[in-house]
């Protein structure tokens, strides 16, 4: 009988040899963000001219690998679950396609064969004595893809933490291993200005001691975090764990003691931050990394009483429809987990769902609160789900309100320079 160590040695290979297992027509699933394996994706890029009709599917790619090339799209193309900086330009130009989906449902789409997963490539921790690796940086939809895939390729890196949770894979499930030791990709905290700080204060004032938090990515959610360090006994059940949440843990504001679901545990599905964050995940019994159909399932997340979900949008109309992923018809990001957690917070006993946005864009020349969404805008969070909307001018609470009451509340938190024309538009739309 082979031991885990003997299997490991049998499956060690170079990155070019590993990606030679990828066939024409395959879909290669890559984890979110820092979970992407650079040696394997560079090797795939180098081999792309020898392949045909290979798709790479991923949320939030961080590096612009050479396969992201419109000239070789027929060889290897990118089908985005969510656009990041590396793929946004391709998505807007049309040579990167995308898959509309709630983050929580991507594993189900993969399990049911609706979204293909022939090959998985992922970063992984070193193997433990029992033959297991931890996909700690992003188990997200990757664990579901492993169940379906013909080939699983791991890039084993000693800088990847061995985290707790449902994020482990055994050596027997792996077709090829590539070793690397390059530093993990680090992402700093977004810049926070006066507008973000003002929005953060409004939200922080509505978060009680003992609340459980889901915090999205961006300057405003992190501005909220900065103003929560005086709170007590906060909990974390989120999709992304970043340095903002780490600062709350280190300050003592997060204890997870009063969570009503998985008390004592910080729960997340991907990590995006500094090496300090990644080291904190290593064999930490207080933090667990789980697949996204566990973290983001609204019915599971809602088991946390006083769940507060904080997410950003790009534009909102006078009845409360949020366009959080496109600029008109032009894609910008993706659906992600915003709707998952808005619905979870709405179902939670004492929960609050916050949608945050600056009142204006383009140096104050455009109101982000609009009479109607810009033509072609992809609606992310519906009018039926939206509750608290926060700008630097205040808070509008919408659930249970009539359409006219909603319009009045939203105009009240718009930039003063635009309130007059918004009132006139509301009259034309029979919303005043």
Image (cartoon, rainbow, N blue to C red):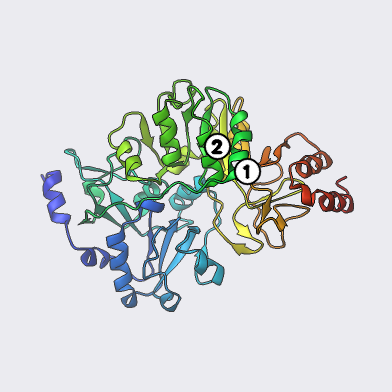
> Which labelled disc corresponds to residue 356?
1
Q: Is residue 1 above or below residue 177?
A: above
Q: Is residue 117 above or below residue 94?
A: above
Rendered location of residue 106, percent (x, y): 48, 50
Q: Identify the residue at horizontal 66%, vertical 62% (top origin).
A: 328
Left or right placement of residue 366 versus residue 186 in this view: right
Q: Identify the residue at horizontal 42%, vertical 25% (top origin).
A: 252
Rendered location of residue 42, percent (x, y): 30, 66
Q: Secondary structure at mark 1?
A: strand
Quick one: quadrant of the N terminus?
A: top left
Q: Identify the residue at horizontal 16%, vertical 38% (top origin).
A: 129
Rendered location of residue 154, percent (x, y): 26, 54
Left or right placement of residue 269 versus residue 17 in this view: right
Rendered location of residue 188, percent (x, y): 42, 48
Left or right placement of residue 278 versus residue 315 in this view: left
The label nearer to you, 2 versus 1, is 2
Asked whether the residues under the numbered discs 2 and 1 touch, taking CB atoms below 8 Å apart as contact, a structural biologist would say: yes
Residue 167 shows in the view: no
Q: How many marks?
A: 2
Quick one: quadrant of the C terminus?
A: top right
Residue nearest the viewer, comparing 225 with 26: 225
Q: Quadrant of residue 131?
A: top left
Going from N to C along the chain, the mark reached first, 2 or 1, is 2
> Which labelled disc corresponds to residue 224?
2
> Which labelled disc corresponds to residue 343?
none
Q: CA distance from mark 2 to mark 1?
A: 10 Å
Residue 330 shows in the view: yes
């Amino acid at each position: 009988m082979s031991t885990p160590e003997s299997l490991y040695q049998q499956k060690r290979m170079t990155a070019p040899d590993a990606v030679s297992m990828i066939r024409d027509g395959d879909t290669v699933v890559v984890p979110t963000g820092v979970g992407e394996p650079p040696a394997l994706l560079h090797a795939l890029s180098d081999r792309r001219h020898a392949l045909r009709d290979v798709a790479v599917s991923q949320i939030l790619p961080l590096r612009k690998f050479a396969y992201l090339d419109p000239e070789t799209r027929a060889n290897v193309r990118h089908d985005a679950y969510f656009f990041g900086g590396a793929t946004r330009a391709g998505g807007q130009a049309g040579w990167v396609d995308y898959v509309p989906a709630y983050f929580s449902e991507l594993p189900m789409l993969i399990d049911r064969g609706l979204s293909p997963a022939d090959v998985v490539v992922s970063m992984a921790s070193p193997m433990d004595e029992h033959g297991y690796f931890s996909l700690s940086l992003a188990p997200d939809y990757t664990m579901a893809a492993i169940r379906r895939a013909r080939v699983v390729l791991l890039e084993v890196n000693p800088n990847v933490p061995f985290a707790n949770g449902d994020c482990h894979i055994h050596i027997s499930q792996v077709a090829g291993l590539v070793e690397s030791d390059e530093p993990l990709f680090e992402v700093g905290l977004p810049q926070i200005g006066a507008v973000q700080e003002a929005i953060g204060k409004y939200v922080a004032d509505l978060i009680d001691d003992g609340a459980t938090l889901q915090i999205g990515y961006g300057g405003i959610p992190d501005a909220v975090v900065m103003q929560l360090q005086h709170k007590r006994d906060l909990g974390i059940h989120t999709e992304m764990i970043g340095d903002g949440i780490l600062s709350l843990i280190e300050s003592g504001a997060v204890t997870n003691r009063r969570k009503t679901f998985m008390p004592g545990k910080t729960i997340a599905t991907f990590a995006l931050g500094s090496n300090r964050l990644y080291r904190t995940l290593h064999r930490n019994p207080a933090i667990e990394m789980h697949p996204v159909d566990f973290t983001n399932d609204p019915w599971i997340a809602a088991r946390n009483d006083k769940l507060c979900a904080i997410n950003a949008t790009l534009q909102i109309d006078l009845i409360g429809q949020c366009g959080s992923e496109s600029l008109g018809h032009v894609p910008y990001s993706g659906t992600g987990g915003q709707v998952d957690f808005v619905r979870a917070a709405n179902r939670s006993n004492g929960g609050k769902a916050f949608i945050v946005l600056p009142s204006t864009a383009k140096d104050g020349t455009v109101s982000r609160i609009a009479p109607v969404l810009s033509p072609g805008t992809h609606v992310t969070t519906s009018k039926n789900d939206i509750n608290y909307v926060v700008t630097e001018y205040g808070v509008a609470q919408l659930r249970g309100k009539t359409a006219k009451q909603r319009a009045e509340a939203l105009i009240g938190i718009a930039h003063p320079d635009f309130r007059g024309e918004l009132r006139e538009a509301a009259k034309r739309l029979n919303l005043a």
